[in-house]
Structures are given as C-alpha cells and as structure tokens.
C-alpha cells in the first residue's frame, strides 16, 4: 500500500482521530462547535461526540484536546484548573488507553474532587476497579518468579521514561542484558519478563528507569525461580490403588490436601479412573490446595476430566485424560444440546478445568478424545469441548495467575475437534484467562474449530513460546489484551484449518479501544499459513490492536481483500511496530502488509528467493537473524542459514582517504574528526559529505556502526547523486525529528549496529555519502551530543 494514497490513514485513539479531523477542517466557516455538531465519523466515535459535544468543544479551545502536549507545570495548572466533570468524562472516553495519564493529570491540576473524578470515569465506561488504582500510588513493585522466567512490574511511572534491565544468576559474575520493560498505560507502570532462566536459581535484577530529563532511578530485585518439582509432604504420598475403588476420585471427600510445607501427592500405579457420566468430574480436587496428581489415567466425567474450583498450588503431571464431557442428544441449527429442553448448546466441557484457581503447573500430560466435538463457524461461534480451560482469578490476589502449561500434548482429531484447545474463561475481562505471570511453552496443540491457544483477558507477563500449533481456525488469540505486556515467541504455527479446511489467521488480535489496553510482543515465530499471519477479530465492534513484532518468518499462500497478509491491520494503530520480519506471500512472490508503513522495516533478505526457499526446507530449525537485530534475552540463536552465502560487500567507503566538505547551509557549529582508520567523530550541529563511487541495486543493504552520546534531532546518513540534500535519500537512525527515511527500527542500540535495506528506496549511482548530526534548536553551550560513525559499507 502506498502511504501517500488518500485512502491510507493511520489509526490512533478516538481523541487523536477527532483532533486531527477538527484541526484539519476548522476555518472561518467551520467552527469547532459546528464541526462537532455535524460529525459523521466512525460510529463509536460519533457516539462519544454526540454525548460530550459541548465538553469536547471546550477542551479543544482550551488546548487540552491535542496530541501529547509538552507544556510546563504552570501551563497545566491554567489549562486544567477549571475542568468540569463532563470534560473529564470526555477525556476518559476519547483516550481509553491513557487511563493512568488522565487520572494523574486531572487529580493533580483540576479542582475536581476524588468522587467527581470517580463518577466521571465510570460515566465514560472505565473499569471501577482501576479508577483510583490508576496512579498506582499504593501498589508495590513486583518480581514474580515462575520456573523458567520472572515477571516484573514497576508502578508510578511515566510514558516518556525508559526502563532498561540487566540480570545475573547468584553464582555469575557478569550481568546479562534483558529486554527493556514496556509501558503499561492502564496502571501507569513498566512491565516485562526475563525468560529462559534456570529453575530453582536466585537471580539479581537491576532496572534503570531514565526519565525525559535524564534523571535516573535504580530498582533492584532478588528473586528465586521455582523448582522443577514441588516439595512433597512424605506423610501425604498416596498410591491410587490404595485409595481408589471406582467411580469418581473425590479429593475433597478424602480430605487429601497439602500445605506450604509440602504437597499431598497421588501417584497412578495401574488402576484407571473410570468415572462415567454420572459425576461432574472424574477427578474432583475441589478447593483443596497443595495437591499433585502424577501419572493418572482418567476417563469420563459428565463435564470435566479433572476439576478444581477456588484452589491454588495444583500440580498435574503425566496424566492421560479422555472420554469426558456431555454427548449430543439434540442437534439444533448445527449445534449440540444435552437434552431437547436445554436452552444452551454444549460448551466449556474440559479435560482439565481449574476454575478461579491460581498457581498451577500442568506438564507432560495428554488430553484427547472428548465425547463431543465442536461445530465450526458456518453455524456460528464454535461450541464444544476443550482440552484445558483456565480461569486464573483466585479470590485472593496472592494466588492469581502463575499458571505454567508446559510440554503437553493436547489434540483432537479431524472429525472430533475441540472448540479451543486451551481456552480462557471471562476473556473480555481483565480478570479473565491466565490473568498475569503465566507461561505456556513446549506444547503440541492440534485440531480446533476455533483457537488453538486463547489467552484473551488479563495478559500481564503472560508468555507463549516454543509451541507447535496445527489444524485450528486460528493459532493464538490475544483478542482482547486488557493489560499487557504479553509475549509470543519461538512458536511454530503451520498447517492451519478447521474441519472444513478454512482458517483465519495465525495470531488473532483486536479490542484495543473497546477493552483497553495491552501491548503484545511477537518475536521470532515461524508462521506458514494459507491466509494471514497477524490479523484482527472485532471485540465489541473494535478491531484495533497494539503489537511490536520482530524477526518473525511469515509465509502466506492466498490473496484477496482480507487474505494473504503478514500483518493485516485495517486500523493501522500508530503504536504498532514491525521490524525485521521476513514476510512472503507465495502467490504474489512478494511481501504483503496492511499496516502503518512508517513503523515497518522489512528483513533485508525479503526479496531473496534463494534465501526464502532455504527457510521453507529448514523451518523451524533455524533463525535468520543478524547480530544487529538480536533481541536481548529472547533471541536464542544468531546465524544466517548455512545454505545462503554471506552478504557480499560491494562498496566499502575509505573515508580516511578523501576530504570531506561541510554543508554550509546545515553547519552551525561543532567539529569533525576523521581517524586514520576511517572513523568519523562529529559534534555540534554538523552535516558533512564525502565524495564516493557506489552503485546501489534493489538488494543493497547499507550497514554501519553508530556510537551516540546524548540525543540529537537527527543522526543519519545520506546517499546522494549531487550536492542537493533530499529527504527521500537521507536515512535517520536516531533523533527526535521526523524527517527523512525512518531507519530507527534498523538501529540496535545494544550492539550499535545499523543495517538498512537502502535498495528498496534508492538505486543507481551514488556520488556523495552524507553524515548528519542535526541539532538546529539546541544552542552550542547546551549541546553535548557526540556521534562516532564507523564501518560504513554497502552489501548485497
């Protein structure tokens, strides 16, 4: 898609869209009041405008309705001092993602009481449970360990800050870099995960929060990951043959439960639990806690194979669960009912269901062969059984989340498919699904008529990785993500399709505005599907989503109006970013996106057919990631596919051998020094050009090393044919000013390497290499920025 096309529009929050409309349309004949009175935009926004028309008009006139105004404390006091309850409600409704921001501003600068603000927020549709928690002043920072990961949350933060992470094991002397924590706008926190950790190991963690003024606050944590096995009470080890004589195994009736000192453990030693359909569940854990089930074979259960409710610290290992759930007595409109008088189709029958329970491990289990399969989408939303159902919202906050689902095989069959394989309950609520601090990894999941994994709902530090997913209508659903960040990485999603062979997308998102607001990071997955890689599903009429994708390999096959896209984002949310994804549509023999193209940077070998063919044969055993694009703590492997030749250098610029020329209309002050090795060090407000001789082709990649101290308006390079600089031949790798080709996503600050597919934008003869350090608005005595350019070359 051409971003200069009149139909190319970027999406943001409703307030951003409305502001842009009014700002572009207002004139002497169109006042803000008349524009709002006649507004005919999207239905959800039109409803907000109609409800708060007068308040929005006043907000615009008071310069409150504007994109992220950078104003002084005194100016904030003036603008917000007379804010009304109606205007506060309008702000909450127009900016659903920025709950914490507006709570903080309105509470600090307006004359509204806490009760007024509370009522304004509820009127706008905000979740009452977070209205006063949004500033998070009473929340404690957390480091929550699982077995192989630790989730971090630091409250009371600001969006303009950054939060870098480093960590080390207790016995290590060196620190490892983690991925920066992500901004979480509902509670105003930074959150994120450290992954691929060793079990039962103490880690020291340092988080450095740097605000917009350069001030630094250090946060330190010490956390020990959980063991690969739970502690067992030696006096509470039970062999199944000693406690089971047929029918349901009822742990509540047997009073089998453990304590913080040790789990009670039941070991399968031969007998099969055969419960039939007379009891709700073949194994009833009830609300007993600190329980481990090991190597049980479970058959039957009217609704569930294994069931717990309001329990915690449950460990299920090596169990085989099948032949559970209700059978169809009546079929109406393609859906199964348990009786002719039943009003609801059969749904939510589960091999394992832990209802309103938390802190659980489910590992090395097989769940298969339910008594009833699910219908497909041809007769409406699929209804039927699942393998695992999760609702990790325990009554006590201390036991919420912390689900680990690892190394299992959950599978249906072609003719008897699950609804979802892993399904979450209450998945349009923040308390739904896995809730927080959970991990799903190493599983084989197959045969669903809807989602293979569903983590919808609360998703703070929920990890989905190293799974193989096949034969579903959708691979992984994150629609909606009500509280991020969540992480999907190193999954192999392929051979999708429901029982009709139809599919929608490998990763399904949506609901960012209607059910705000969480970000999902999607890293280094292998996706090979017919239709779409990442696409939306409407949640309460909203298909907006917020993703940060990097280093994924996405193959699609078909084409059509909504088919064949690596990322299909009709709303083009301005917060989403795609960097170094290899996207290839087999039919078009090219990449296909519907996305905010300003935030898209393709893999440098996206057009190399030899490379792409090699990936198909090796998928998913190799990861084509250059060193400059590695993701701290997430990238497991750094290599180019062995069958592909190393990039060939076609132009290596010997800058020490030629004289540079300062650009008179851009040079204001500063210095330029060229070392004997060709390293160029620049300070000030300073553009220079070097004469060069290079011919760029469509496959050319320019690379260089950048060491930057401080923050400039523009740091970049130019590739010009003459001595006239043009924005479409300047590549900006860093800086605050939006000018030139955007290569910021191609600069890895951890390695100082920049790699940009210059041949996609510039081809032909290049006679001048420009080096740019731009600081127009910064006075010399205030400017301490320094940039070192080195190793500049062009490869193919």
Image (cartoon, rainbow, N blue to C red):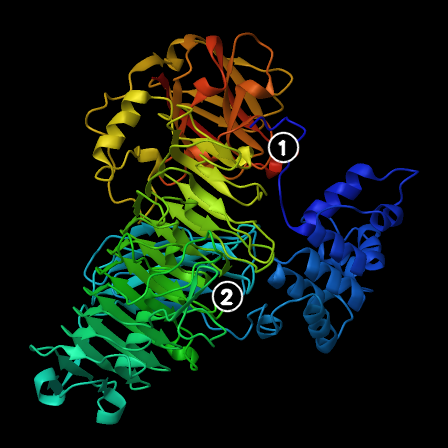
Residue 662 location (% of width, % of height): 55, 15
To which residue does mark 1 refer? 8
Residue corresponding to mark 2: 155
Quadrant of the rendered image containing residue 312: bottom left
Say which mark, if any, is on residue 300.
none
Quarter of the rendering occupied by the N terminus: top right
Q: Residue furthest right?
A: 29
Residue 72, given in percent of the width and then of the height, sits at 71, 53
Image height check: is 651 above or below 543? above
Viewer-proximal residue, 278 or 454?
278
Q: Identify the secondary structure beneath mark 2.
A: loop
Task: Look at the picture and state if 580 lies above or below 319.
Answer: above
Which element type, helix, strand or loop, lies under badge 1?
Answer: loop
Number of other residues with Cα within 10 Å of mark 2, as a class: few under 14, some 14 to 19, many 20 or more: many
Quadrant for the C terminus, please: top left
Q: Is residue 90 left or right of residue 471?
A: right
Estimate how packed mark 1 is, as few (under 14), some (14 to 19) or many (20 or more) residues with alpha carbons within 10 Å. Answer: some
Examine the rendering and report whether any part of residue 145 can be seen.
Answer: no
Instruction: Give the Cα distance between marks 1 and 2.
Output: 37 Å
Is there a contact, CB below 8 Å, between mark 1 and mark 2?
Answer: no
Please report the residue visible at 54 percent of the width from the left and 18 percent of the height from the top: 729
- For image coordinates 48% across by 44% down, the residue present is 535
Residue 371 seen in render: yes
Of the image marks 1 and 2, the number of the one nearer the N terminus: 1
| Quarter of the figure with residue 252 | bottom left
């Amino acid at each position: 898609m051409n971003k200069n096309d009149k139909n190319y529009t970027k999406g943001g929050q409703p307030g951003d869209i409305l502001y842009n409309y009014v700002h572009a349309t207002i004139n002497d004949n169109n006042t803000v009041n008349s524009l709002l009175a006649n507004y005919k935009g999207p239905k959800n926004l039109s409803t907000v405008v109609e409800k708060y028309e007068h308040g929005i008009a006043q907000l615009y006139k008071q310069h409150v309705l504007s994109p992220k105004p950078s104003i002084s404390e005194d100016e904030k006091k003036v603008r917000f001092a007379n804010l009304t309850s109606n205007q506060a409600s309008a702000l909450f409704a127009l900016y659903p993602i920025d709950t914490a921001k507006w709570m903080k501003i309105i509470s600090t600068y307006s004359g509204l009481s806490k009760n007024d603000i509370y009522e304004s927020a509820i009127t706008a549709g905000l979740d009452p449970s977070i209205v006063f928690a949004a500033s998070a002043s009473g929340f404690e920072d957390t480091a929550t360990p699982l077995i192989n990961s630790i989730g971090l949350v630091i409250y009371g933060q600001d969006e303009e800050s950054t939060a870098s992470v480093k960590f080390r094991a207790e016995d290590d002397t060196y620190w490892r870099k983690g991925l920066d924590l992500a901004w979480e706008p509902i509670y105003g926190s930074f959150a994120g995960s450290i992954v691929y950790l060793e079990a039962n190991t103490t880690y020291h963690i340092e988080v450095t929060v740097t605000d917009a003024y350069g001030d630094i606050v250090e946060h330190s944590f010490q956390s020990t990951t959980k063991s690969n096995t739970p502690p067992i009470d030696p006096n509470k080890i039970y062999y199944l043959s000693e406690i089971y004589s047929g029918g349901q195994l009822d742990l509540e009736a047997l009073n089998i439960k453990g304590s913080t000192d040790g789990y009670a453990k039941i070991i399968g030693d031969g007998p099969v639990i055969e419960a039939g359909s007379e009891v709700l569940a073949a194994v009833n854990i009830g609300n007993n806690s600190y329980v481990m089930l090991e190597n049980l074979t479970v058959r039957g259960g009217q609704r569930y194979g294994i069931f717990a409710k309001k329990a915690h610290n449950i460990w299920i290992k090596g169990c085989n669960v099948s032949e559970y759930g209700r059978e169809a007595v009546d079929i109406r409109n393609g859906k199964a009912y348990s009786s002719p008088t039943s009003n609801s189709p059969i749904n939510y029958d589960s091999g394992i269901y832990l209802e309103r329970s938390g802190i659980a491990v489910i590992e090395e289990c097989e769940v298969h062969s339910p008594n009833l399969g699910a219908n497909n989408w041809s007769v409406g939303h699929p209804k039927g059984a699942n393998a695992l159902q999760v609702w990790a919202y325990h009554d006590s906050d201390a036991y919420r989340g912390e689900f680990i689902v690892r190394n299992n095989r959950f599978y249906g069959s072609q003719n008897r498919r699950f609804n979802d394989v892993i399904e979450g309950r209450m998945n349009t609520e923040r308390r739904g699904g896995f809730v927080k601090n959970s991990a799903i990894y190493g599983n084989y999941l197959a045969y669903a008529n809807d989602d293979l994994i569903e983590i919808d709902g609360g998703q703070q530090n929920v990890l989905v990785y190293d799974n193989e997913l096949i034969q579903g209508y959708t691979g992984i659903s994150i629609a909606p993500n009500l509280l991020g960040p969540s992480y999907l990485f190193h999954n192999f999603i392929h051979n999708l399709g429901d029982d009709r062979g139809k599919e929608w997308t490998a990763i399904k998102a949506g609901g960012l505005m209607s059910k705000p607001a969480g970000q999902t990071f999607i890293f280094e997955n292998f996706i090979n599907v017919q239709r779409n890689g990442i696409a939306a599903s409407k949640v309460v009429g909203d298909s907006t989503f917020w993703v940060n994708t990097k280093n994924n390999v996405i193959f699609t096959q078909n084409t059509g109006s909504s088919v064949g896209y690596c990322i299909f984002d009709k709303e083009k949310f301005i917060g989403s970013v795609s960097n170094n994804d290899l996207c290839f549509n087999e039919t078009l023999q090219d990449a296909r996106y519907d996305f905010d193209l300003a935030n898209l940077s393709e893999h440098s070998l996206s057009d190399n057919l030899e490379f792409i063919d090699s990936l198909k044969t090796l998928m998913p055993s190799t990861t084509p990631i250059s060193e400059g694009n590695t993701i701290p703590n997430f990238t497991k492997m750094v290599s180019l596919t062995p069958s592909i030749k190393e990039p060939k250098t076609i132009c290596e610029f010997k800058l020490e051998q030629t004289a540079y020329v300062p650009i008179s209309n851009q040079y204001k002050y500063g210095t330029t020094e060229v070392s004997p090795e060709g390293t160029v060090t620049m300070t000030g407000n300073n553009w220079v050009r070097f004469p060069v001789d290079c011919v760029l082709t469509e496959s050319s990649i320019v690379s260089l090393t950048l060491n930057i101290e401080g923050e400039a308006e523009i740091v970049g390079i130019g590739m010009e044919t003459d001595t006239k600089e043009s924005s479409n031949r300047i590549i900006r790798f860093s800086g605050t000013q939006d000018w030139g080709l955007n290569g910021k996503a191609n600069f890895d600050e951890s390695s100082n390497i920049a790699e940009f597919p210059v041949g996609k934008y510039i081809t032909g003869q290049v006679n001048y290499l420009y080096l740019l350090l731009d600081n127009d608005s910064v006075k010399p005595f205030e400017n301490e920025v320094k940039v070192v350019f080195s190793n500049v070359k062009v490869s193919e």
